Image (spheres, rainbow, N blue to C red):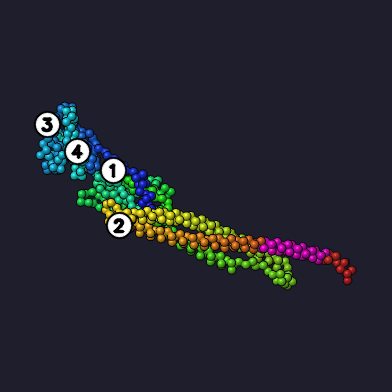
Amino acid sequence: MIHMKVRLLLKPRLSVFSALVLHHTVFLLTHSGGGQSHVIGTSQPIVAKVGDDITLPCHLKTAMDATDLTVEWARPDLEPRFVYLRRDGVELQPEEHPLYMGRTSLSTNKLKCGDISLKLSQLKLSDAGTYKCLVPKSGTESVVALTVGSVSSPDIKISKVSNGVSLQCESGGWYPEPEVSWLDGEGNLLSAGPTETTRSPDDLYTVSSRVTVEKRPSNRFTCRVQQKDTNQTRETTIHLPDDFFMAQSNSAVRITICLAVYFMSVMAFFVLWKRGQHQIKTPSRSTEQQHLMDGDTMIQLEMKEENLSEELQKNEDDLKHVQQVNMILMTQKKELENQRQTLTSLEDKDKTQIKENNKKLKKLPKTEKSKKMEKRVKTREDLDRRSKEHDELLCNTKKLQETADQMITIMKERKEKLEKDKEKINQHLKETAREREETQKKLQLEQQEREEDQNNPSSNQDDE
């Protein structure tokens, strides 16, 4: 059930955002006995709600004084059938059905103009049916169909669940049976569970519907209850604060913390593993000399340059990965800081509400003492439990912040080391390239000398 904090936030908003729409359309279905009818009405059905005062239209075709005429209003399905009976200017109440006693009347002033419309007060569900307006002198009648409906304002209850916020809409006192729908702040239909319907002994329907919602741009949700046949609609809209989703039964926050702990554990393993994996593979000076002495110098230098290029590529890949991880950690750190600020704010609200509740516990209610005191004690238990949960979450969030800071420091050191290694590799590459160029020049010079000796055999003979 909704916490006190949310009740305080939502209570004033319910009246602001509630939209109660109730349309009353008047219907009258008229039948005549042919073109010679002396009793006429309108051409639309009547729909009204319980408790309304309505008028069933009927008047003589010729505007004449009907004060002394016999006027009958009846329902064929009742016994006695008369709803209202007037003869020679006098109402005969004893002959009228007891259900309508004192609730039907004709206007004396309108009778003088031939208007014999029936006023029916304080409508009941049992008033629904077909009514006949008859002036025996004319021998014709007008038939009126009346539908009676009942409505009430929906009530929304809020509770926190693991995957969001659960909203339950309930509305009783409806007739005929209505439909329930949920809408978001933009007027889009929400997917809700099946509507539960119950019917009371007085034939009124109670409907209930539940929907689970997540945080949205407006956080505004509407429960709409409508009866299409009677064109009657009522709806209630609520607005949920952002921090209500932040602290939802702590499940979402706990999931975030678990994921963060798992993520940081994986990151720690990755850093330690990479530390042992990455070493710059550069031959020692003695090995280089040995290679230069024992093998083809040029081939050895080319192999060395190739190895250094591969090492440089690995270094750049590792450096790029470390930068990406660092960005993720910085984002995580920011989210944890926002979460910490939210939890701190919720803690402050908890303290304020606990303080207010303590004051109420010290005062005895004037009425319903036992019930109200029990409610206050229950509220205090909920506040204590929620405060404890917020404390625990805040503690875990602080620990995660410390872990995030440590990981960021490790990644910073790792980045610095990779950058230094990259500088060393580039330096070795330059030295190797320079050495390869010198060796290549030396080989070219020796080749040139050999070619010259071959082209000048006389110089070789002189030497001999």
> Please, what secondary structure does the residue beneath circle 4 have?
strand
Percent from the top left, x then y, of residue 429?
A: 69, 62
Q: Which of marks 4 and 1 is nearer the N terminus?
A: 4
The part of the chain drawn in magenta is 424-452
> In the image, which is nearer the foreground, mark 2 or mark 1?
2
Rendered image: mark on residue 89: 3
The residue sitting at 73% across, 70% down in the picture is 289
Q: Which residue is under mark 2?
A: 374
The disc labelled 3 sits on which kind of residue? Gly
Residue topped by disc 1:
232
Q: Nearer the viewer, residue 397 or 427?
A: 397
* Secondary element type, mark 1: strand
Q: Do the residues labelled 4 and 1 touch (CB within 8 Å)?
A: no
Kindly identify the amino acid type of the residue bearing the numbered disc 4: Leu
Quadrant containing the N terminus is: bottom left
- Say the numbered circle drawn on residue 189: none
